[in-house]
Amino acid sequence: MVRLDPVDRAIVRVLAQDGRLPNNALAAAVGVAPSTTLARVRSLRERGVIRGFHADVDPAALGRPLQAMVAVRLRAHTREQIRSFLQHAPGLPGVVSVFHVAGADDYLLHVAVASAEDLRDFVVDHLTSHPAVGHTQTSLIFGVHRGRAVAD
């Protein structure tokens, strides 16, 4: 765990809300000099606290209005099958994120597709046909609401 002082935490909290905030505005928001803010952000990136800056893209605007979480259970939990699945899953068409989880399932895949038929085809063609996959269960996503827990 990386130690963060109150200024670092304030920077992370503000950037989590708006990663495009200019350095001068960020400095004003956290109450330190712009040069200090720049050095702090650089340090947070170097220490792996800030992993990158990303655009929050609406899949529906790109023709993929149907989102789902697909739970995947592997046939066996060998390193070979885990490695095989992890090399395969992130690059599949429509995959937004892959989560390795504990519990009855091994992975949750957040996918965005154009239609119910595309979702079915995704599961059949890319998941259930993979030799490591033993079971899948699909849950439709009706809405996504971003939380703030990491920045608090």
Image: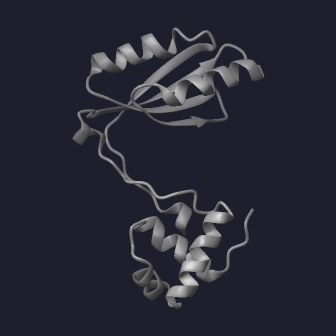
Q: Measured from the top left, where is residue 34 in percent x and y?
A: 50, 87
Position of residue 115 measured from the top left corner of the image (x, y, whole percent): 26, 23
* Residue at the (43%, 16%) spot, across then down: 123
Quadrant of the rendered image containing residue 67: top left
Tell me the quarter of the image containing the N terminus.
bottom right
For the residue pair 47 and 106, the one nearer the viewer reads as: 47
User: For residue 28, which quarter of the picture?
Assistant: bottom left
Residue under the image location 47 percent in, 15 percent down: 126
Q: Is residue 100 above or below residue 29?
A: above
Can residue 125 be seen here? The reply is: yes
**Residue 53 pos. (x, y %):** 47, 58
Q: Is residue 148 left or right of residue 36?
A: left
* Front residue of this view, candidates 94 and 69: 94
| Residue 27 to residue 57: above or below | below
Q: Quadrant of residue 44?
A: bottom right
Label count reads: 0
* Front position in the image: 46 or 59: 46
Q: Is residue 105 visible?
A: no
Horizontally, residue 124 falls left or right of residue 83, namely left
Give the residue at x 47% y 85%.
Answer: 27
